Amino acid sequence: MRSSCVLLTALVALAAYYIYIPLPSSVSDPWKLMLLDATFRSAQQVSNLIHYLGLSHHLLVLNFIIISFGKKSAWSSAQVKVTDTDFDGVEVRVFEGSAKPEEPLKRSVVYIHGGGWALASASMSWSPNDEIRYYDELCKAMAEELNAVIVSIEYRLVPKVYFPEQIHDVIRATKYFLQPEVLHKYSVDPGRIGVSGDSAGGNLAAALGQQFNQDANLKNKLKVQALIYPVLQALDFNTPSYQQNVNTPILPRYVMVKYWVDYFHGNYDFVQAMVVNNHTSLDVEEAAALRAHLNWTSLLPASITKNYKPVMQTTGNTRIVQEIPQLLDARSAPLIADQKVLRHLPKTYILTCEHDVLRDDGIMYAKRLESAGVEVTLDHFEDGFHGCMIFTSWPTNFSVGIRTRNSYIKWLDQNL
């Protein structure tokens, strides 16, 4: 009996040690975030072990675990019709809200989900009737509250495909949707269409916006873009937010760098060098012309830069950008696009969270867009963390998740 008590005490102590991580007091629901983070870390460790044993790719395993936990949404609404179909060969899920009698044509949002270009999709090998709770709930809420048509694009994922195939998918599906006959089918007003996405989906939404801005053949232009804690650059992993939130849930710096390497089908041996900016050191000539586009000492306010110092290596690993030139491609890193590309982008909403390595990506993009003459709303949440908007239902319901979602939908309602 005594030995059992000792063993139980030891197990509880080990579990507490694994779950507990020091968090800022300002973060939303810290203990719940610790539990969520411990669950996600456990899933990552299991997937990494299976990858190491050569049984499957770690991202396929991780996605299977995430989708298994996220199946069967409890959210239902008689006001929203949900249809699975494809647009020019790209799988999409369409959420149709009820039209108002006084507005026969509905507004619409093309939504691109996050997940490191590799996770959180329902379109792999599961039944089309399976629902991924987190994004289905968000899209249904948008469709119902905005009386809109929401097109959620199920782009192909890493490791099945790599950059730039994800961008090709979202562009192809969106161009198909913008055809007059398709808009007529869904009773959508061609002048009230926006694009939106979170995290890696925010990256793809920003890239899509820039590509559409340069396409003279497009008759229907996007009215707004709404980017939720978007990932926008891979040149500097030591911005103040990367330094401040290096080990913060749900997206530590090391994990974000690995997502980038996976997206480009790069060499994992480069990850540690990229963490300390060896890929954009002063001796890497290819990166020199782009540094001004993400000079955070001038793009970020003093309240954010504080006492943080830029990490600029004199010599680094020139082999990295030679083997992964995609790092310097504006389609993967919309923040480094030329000013002339930004000039005619639509009205923009950018949501950022204080406890997120990507915070400064969003703030810098807002500053660059404003400098180019674009109307921008920067919506910052001091208690927010990466991914918080999709955590609105028990048991992963966070107060900041509900507030960010409400603020985002309110902006769309007022501007779309």
Image (spheres, rainbow, N blue to C red):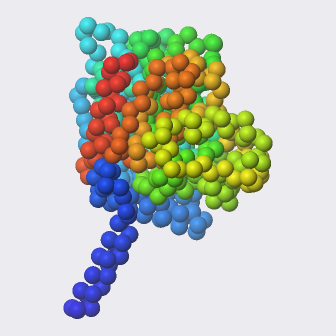
Q: Residue at x 35, y 30 (%)?
A: 408
Indicate the position of residue 226 as horizontal and vertical percent values: 44, 28
In the rendered image of this protein, does residue 314 appear above or below residue 222?
below
Location of residue 81 by image quarter: top left
Q: Residue at x 53, y 67 (%)?
A: 49
Location of residue 289 by image quarter: top right
Placement of the N terminus among the 4 image quadrants: bottom left
The foreground one among 325 and 318 is 318
Placement of the C terminus among the 4 image quadrants: top left
Q: Residue at x 36, y 48 (%)?
A: 70
- Residue 390 appears in the picture as rendered: no
The foreground one among 201 and 226 is 226
In the rendered image of this protein, does residue 216 appear above or below residue 47?
above
How many dots with numbers?
Answer: 0
Indicate the position of residue 67 as horizontal and vertical percent values: 41, 49
Q: Residue at x 60, y 48 (%)?
A: 310
Q: Is residue 82 left or right of residue 293?
A: left
Indicate the position of residue 116 as horizontal and vertical percent values: 52, 46
In the rendered image of this protein, does residue 363 appear above or below residue 40?
above
The foreground one among 190 and 304 is 304
- Residue 40 appears in the picture as rendered: yes
The foreground one among 209 and 126 is 209
Indicate the position of residue 270 as horizontal and vertical percent values: 68, 56
Q: Is residue 237 left or right of residue 150?
A: right
